[in-house]
Image: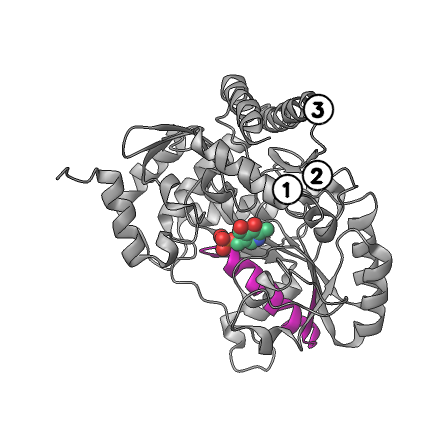
Amino acid sequence: MNEPTLVENCVERAQQVFPAGSNGEFNLPPELSIVIDRGKGGELWDTEGRRFLDFSLGWGSSLIGHANPKVVEAVRRQAPLGSNFAYITRDSLQLAEEIVRVSPACEQVRFCASGTEATMYCQRLARSFTGRRKILKFEGAYHGANEIGVTSLFPTSPPNYPHPDPTSAGIEAIVKPTVLVAPFNDLATTERIVAKHAHELAGVIAEPLQRCVPPAEGFLEGLRELTERYGILLMFDEVVTGFRLAYGGAQEYYGVVPDLVAYGKALGGGYPIGAFGARREIMDLVREDRMGQPDYMWVASTLGGNPISMAAACAALEVFAGKGVYEHLHWLGRYVREGIERVLSDAQVTSQVIGDGPLAQVVFSDQPVHDYRSTKAGDGARGRVLALELFRRGVFLNPMGTKLYISLAHDEAICDEFLEIFAASLAATS
Ligand SMILES: Cc1ncc(COP(=O)(O)O)c(C=O)c1O
């Protein structure tokens, strides 16, 4: 009998110890399962030496590219000096100062270890600050694995607005009475919901670029005006957009300043990170010397601000602050989106490519895409078949969402190679 290869062996072992054989990442069919060995720049290699073009980037966390030499050097310098003190270090201080400098909403920040934590603290701050309990979110938005973050993320038969769909088991009792849901980019409907519930509404949380759907002209400005009018806090989840659309994130890119901001992903240079911030009067609620007061708000994150992530983040921001970085990222994004559009149009496939900055997504629909429902109206099954074919041909991407992340380490050659594989995959699945 032949010895099983390492990868078969690993896949089999994974089936035993991980639900569906995965750590929750991609849920690939077993024949496509791989085990990753290493990454460099915009490429990955599996344990059998097979090369992949990476258009997932650790769900966008490695915007800087895998194993960026400056990040590696910073981590190497810090590692022998200790990996966690749960206390301020020079790097965490420097990083906090830099976030406060570039984020107009933030006079103060706190670090945590993930985007999920960061948005959870923003929601809790909104409630603590206003003394109200409801949060409004937009259908189809993801704010991490916390209860509000997953609510109405993938509703199959969405309830009428503003009723939430739990999307996950185990949260219904929490989110039904506390979460309101509105359609992204529909200011009139949002305004009606906000006006009706203003007395119990603590905050509105939004991904300024929702998944890959850009905000309609005036939508974010409208949210700003609306929330201000009713004394409701506006939260921008910048976990994806932060340091990606611009150095100053969506706040700079779209020119709208929220009350609360959550960061994660790209900020960490590929290492675990989360951060949230706001003006001082809001952040004051988390001061530990207020403990015992009714509006004191609990924050604690064992690995938040750990020196390894802080060192990596400081190094990453130094790179992001370099000349021409955002011009390059936007150029790459446009290059990929326009290239995909060309391939799809040559093949006469009804579709459109959405996204902004270094992000792209194909929607198989000719109807305008402006929110969750119009995105879902596209042919999702076709998208998944195409994504699996891309994967089969060496493009590492998330076949669940087909949102493509492009890194600073991608170049024209990688994008051209991707576009060739895209054309071949489309032909093979048409
Ligand atoms: C917009 C947005 N917010 C929050 C999160 C959660 O971040 P994390 O996975 O680091 O908890 C994600 C993750 O994909 C995200 O896309």
Element on which disc 3 rests: helix
For label 1, the residue is 249
For label 2, the residue is 253
For label 3, the residue is 345
Compared across the picture, whether 300 is left or right of 234 comes to left
In the image, residue 132 lies at what x, y percent? 70, 76
The answer to whether one can see residue 67 in this image is: yes
Examine the structure image and report whether residue 71 is included in the region drawn in magenta. no
In the image, residue 413 lies at what x, y percent? 50, 17
> Which range is magenta?
111-136
- The residue depicted at 46 percent of the width and 34 percent of the height is 391
> What is the quadrant of residue 179 in the picture?
bottom right
Classed neighbour count for the residue bearing mark 2: other residues with Cα under 10 Å, few (<14), some (14–19), many (≥20): some
Classed neighbour count for the residue bearing mark 3: other residues with Cα under 10 Å, few (<14), some (14–19), many (≥20): few
Asked whether mark 1 and ligand 1 are closer than 8 Å, the reply comes as no
Q: Amino acid at mark 1?
A: Gly
- The residue depicted at 73 percent of the width and 39 percent of the height is 365
Determine the CA span between mark 2 and mark 1. 6 Å
Query: Can you say whether 318 is above or below 29 in the image?
Result: above
Q: Are marks 2 and 1 in contact (CB under 8 Å)?
A: yes
> What is the quadrant of residue 255 in the picture?
top right
**Quadrant in which the N terminus is drawn:** top left
Q: Nearer the viewer, residue 327 or 184?
A: 184
Q: Earlier in the sequence, mark 2 or mark 3?
A: 2
Q: Which callout, 2 or 3, points to the residue nearer the camera? A: 3
Q: Amino acid at mark 3?
A: Ser
